[in-house]
Image (cartoon, rainbow, N blue to C red):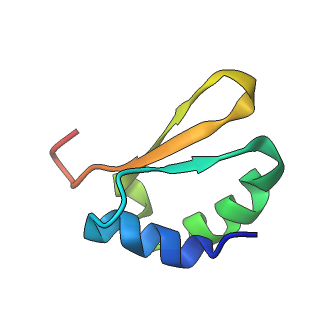
Amino acid sequence: MPDYQQALQQLVAGKIGEITIKPENFFAFRKVWTDFPQRNEIVGTAQRGGIIVYQFHESGKH
C-alpha cells in the first residue's frame, strides 16, 4: 500500500499533480487524509468505477 502521508505532502508541494485512489484503497487513504492539515484544500473528483482523483487547490483558488 502506498504511503499516503508522503503522497499528500508531495501533492501540496507541487511535486505531483494528483493522487488517484482505487475503491479498495479508499478507507486507508481517507484515514490519512482526514488528519492532514490542509485536507480542505485537497479536492476529490469521482470517476467511473469508484476511482477518485484528488488534486490540491489553494484556499480561494478553486
| Quadrant of the rendering where the C terminus is positioned | top left
| Quadrant of the rendering where the N terminus is positioned | bottom right
Residue 49, image x and y in percent?
A: 74, 25
Q: Taking 38 as reference, is 26 left or right?
A: right
Q: Taking 32 as reference, is 43 left or right?
A: left
Residue 27, image x and y in percent?
A: 77, 57
In the picture shown, does residue 12 fall above or below 61?
below
Kindly give the residue lying farthest to the left in the view shown.
Answer: 61
Q: Taking 12 as reference, is 43 left or right?
A: right
Q: Nearer the viewer, residue 6 or 33?
A: 6
Q: Residue at x 36, y 60 (%)?
A: 16
Q: Please tell me in which quadrant of the rendered image residue 22 appears.
A: top right
Residue 37 visible in the picture: no
Q: Please tell me in which quadrant of the rendered image residue 35 appears.
A: bottom right
Kindly give the residue lying farthest to the right in the view shown.
Answer: 24
Residue 40, image x and y in percent?
A: 39, 56
Residue 30, image x and y in percent?
A: 66, 59
Residue 16 visible in the picture: yes
